[in-house]
Image (cartoon, rainbow, N blue to C red):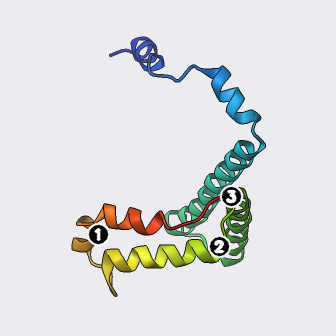
Amino acid sequence: MDSKNYIKDAIKTEATNFEAMNERLMNDGTKRLLHAGIGISTEAGEVLDALKKHIFYGKELDKVNLAEELGDLFWYMAILADELGIEFESVMDRNITKLKARYGEKFSEEKAEKRDLDKEREILEGQKFN
């Protein structure tokens, strides 16, 4: 396949209801969620870049920078949590409960592959949102 045909075929699957997207974005909550999501992705990329420089380029691991990026991640997660109307503690508690249901007291590859997704979803649905 050549690039022109690929592009032609690819854009057939593009979502194009931009009016509906714009209406959803008019909701300030959606804008905050998008801002948080983009920010989390960006900061996670910066963490990976720091690790790449250390692992592949032999640079000293910059723990100060990694801590700063972690702080930025927390900031964006705070925006996300606020918009969803949830507390960090509740998210942390549910996460540990889910992980204990998945692994018991210790990780194993077998348990990671044979997850009970219905049970995990049931645990997560106990989370209260605005």
Q: Is residue 40 left or right of residue 109?
A: right
User: In the image shown, does 41 or 113 lie closer to the viewer?
Assistant: 113
Residue at x 50% of width, y 22% of height: 14
The residue pinned by badge 1 equals 112
- Number of numbered callouts drawn: 3
The quadrant in which the N terminus is found is top left
Q: Is residue 102 left or right of residue 56?
A: left
Disc 3 and disc 1 in contact, CB within 8 angstroms:
no
| Amino acid under disc 2 | Phe
Q: Is residue 13 above or below residue 77?
A: above
Mark 3 vs mark 1, foreground winner is 3
Q: Which mark is residue 88?
A: 2
Give whichever of discs 3 and 1 has the lower sequence position.
Answer: 3
- At label 2, counting other C-alpha atoms closer than 10 Å, the crowd grade (few under 14, some 14-19, many 20 or more) is few
Point out residue 110 in the picture as x, y percentages from the top left corner: 21, 72
Kind of element beneath mark 3: helix
Give whichever of discs 2 and 1 has the lower sequence position.
Answer: 2
Residue at x 69% of width, y 67% of height: 69
User: In the image shown, does 76 or 88 lie closer to the viewer?
Assistant: 88
Q: Is residue 78 left or right of residue 58?
A: right
| Amino acid under disc 1 | Ala
| Amino acid under disc 3 | Leu
User: In the image shown, does 114 or 119 lie closer to the viewer?
Assistant: 119
Point out residue 78 in the picture as x, y percentages from the top left corner: 72, 65
Return the residue found at the far bottom. 105
Point out residue 104 in the picture as x, y percentages from the top left corner: 32, 83
Kind of element beneath mark 1: helix
